[in-house]
Image (tube, helix red, strand yellow):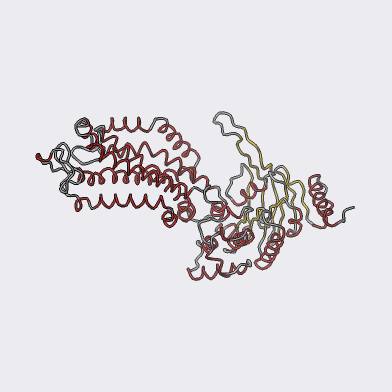
Amino acid sequence: MMKKLLANRVASICLLILSAFTLAGIFAPVIAPHDPNLSDFTKFFAPISWEYPLGADHLGRCILSRLLFGIRTTLFYAFLTMLITLSVGTVIGIISGYIGGKLDNVIMRTCDMLLAFPSEVMVLSLIGVLGPGITSIIIANFIAKLPWYVRMIRSSVIRFNHQNYVLYSNTIETRFHYKLFRHFFPNIASEIAILASMDIGWIILSISTLSFLGLGVELPTPEWGSMLSEAKDVLLTNPEQMMYPGVTIMIVVATCNLLGDSVRELFDPKAQA
Amino acid sequence: MLVSVQNIRKSFAVGDSWFKKSRHEVLKGVSFELFEGECLGLLGESGSGKSTLGKVILGIENPDSGEVVFADAISDLPSHEKMSVVFQDYTSSVNPRLRVEEIISEPLLRTQLTHAEKKQKVNELLVEVGLSESMKTRFPHQLSGGQLQRVCIARAIAPSPKFILLDEAVSSLDVSVQAQVLDLLANLKQRFGLSYLFITHDITVAAYLCNRILIFQDGKVVEQVDDLNNLAHATNNYAKQLLSAAHFLERAFTEPAA
């Protein structure tokens, strides 16, 4: 699977960019030139210099350092959300598809109910109930995205459940964990990879949007969306302030979406002639 | 008697509506017995419910009424030593992501064999079904249809089951490979004392391998032919049609054009 990904040029460039961002996030305290929350009154809107590679913001904080530490909030919380949603979605999807019957009906109708609301409305109302904060963002995104995962994974489990090799396993009553790890997981893993890489961009945007609206991380924690929001207030005097977080979000989200597209192309069963 | 099928009925809901449900009866009271060491042919056209009957016998579909009774000698055996199955569609019968070795050793998982013994057994089985040991590291897509069906047969005989259901097991192979696989099946039956229930729509294939033939139509057994020499004298209309179709094809090839 990895071999195939690396053979594809777009996918490998995207993976390279994402791993660079991830590493930069992990080593932010080492590579950042300044403390991201240290404000220096003499450096308001400092221009680009060796000391401040991307300049300073309206409180005299180093923008590069804030962007680097922002990876930890935006990107890492997006990964965390994805991980939680995927694992819970996979478990529920497999239960629903494998057991079937009444339980399946209850789970599917609940999903239908959740899917009846547009995701954004769902996320906003959940945060309204839970109150702002990064935990609520994760929970809200999790609940908004979960039904999609459950549905997708359920349908592939049902598809594989009707394959003759699973019928054979059922006939000789092979243990469930063999069927799970040998028959189901390897076959749905590619679908999970497609879903995850397509959605990670959406979650990054969602975290940034909510922070932009002031519903996400608490200030002054560096976060790309809240950096945008702060820069918006000085849009007329210092428009370049919006550029740095904006471009960063754009690069990361575009990378994730491109990666998602190439993963889908690589693993779509129909594309495998 | 090895397996006794007693008055099996099975119907499926038609239309996926919550409010209106009608049922379509596929099996309308099927009874027959399979004896030890024989090959019983179940001959019927597509859609007559043969495969559903097969699934009921394997225990992966529950009948609405009736039951499948196994002889006392085998009824207490774990399912993998009791029965096995070879399906028509060999491509979906094996997990495309597993190697031949893993595919064949799946039914050996529940046995007490050690790892080395399992490997040894897989090697023996591959030779047994006319493949070479070197094929065990291949993936299914690297094998031909006939080879893949042999892998399925190797998997089916691996735990030495008493009875094997062959659900159109040769129907999707081309004719020359069909003959080879039929010979292999006949050979294995002799050597391991297997019993087959051979589901097919092809009367010549059934006549080649089977001791007795049941003619199956619209969810019922309409005729039983105990002596295959009498096959030509089958009384049922459907059986006559099948026979004349087979004769028609035969004539077309054997008699010179007028």
Where is residue B211? Give x, y as percent: 75, 59
Task: Pick whichever, B73 or B217, lies toward us.
Answer: B217
Q: Is A58 situated left or right of B102 in this image?
A: left
Q: Is residue A91 visible?
A: no
Where is residue B146? Give x, y as percent: 64, 60
Residue at image position (20%, 34%) is: A238
Task: Pick whichever, A152 or B52, lies toward us.
Answer: A152
Q: Is residue B170 visible?
A: yes
Quarter of the rendering containing residue B2: bottom right
Q: Give the residue furthest to the right.
A: B258
Q: Is A239 situated left or right of A168 in this image?
A: left
Quarter of the rendering containing residue A4: bottom left
Q: Is B89 situated left or right of A185 in this image?
A: right
Where is residue A124? Give x, y as percent: 31, 31
Quarter of the rendering containing residue B86: bottom right
Q: Give the residue furthest to the top.
A: B19
Residue at image position (78%, 55%) is: B226
Q: Give above or below for B186 relative to A58.
A: below
Where is residue A54? Give x, y as percent: 20, 44
Task: Pick whichever, B245 or B30, lies toward us.
Answer: B245
The quadrant in which the N terminus of chain B is found is bottom right
Q: How many marks?
A: 0
Task: Pick whichever, A108 or B172, lies toward us.
Answer: B172
Q: Give above or below for A132 relative to B185.
A: above
Q: Is B125 situated left or right of A197 in this image?
A: right
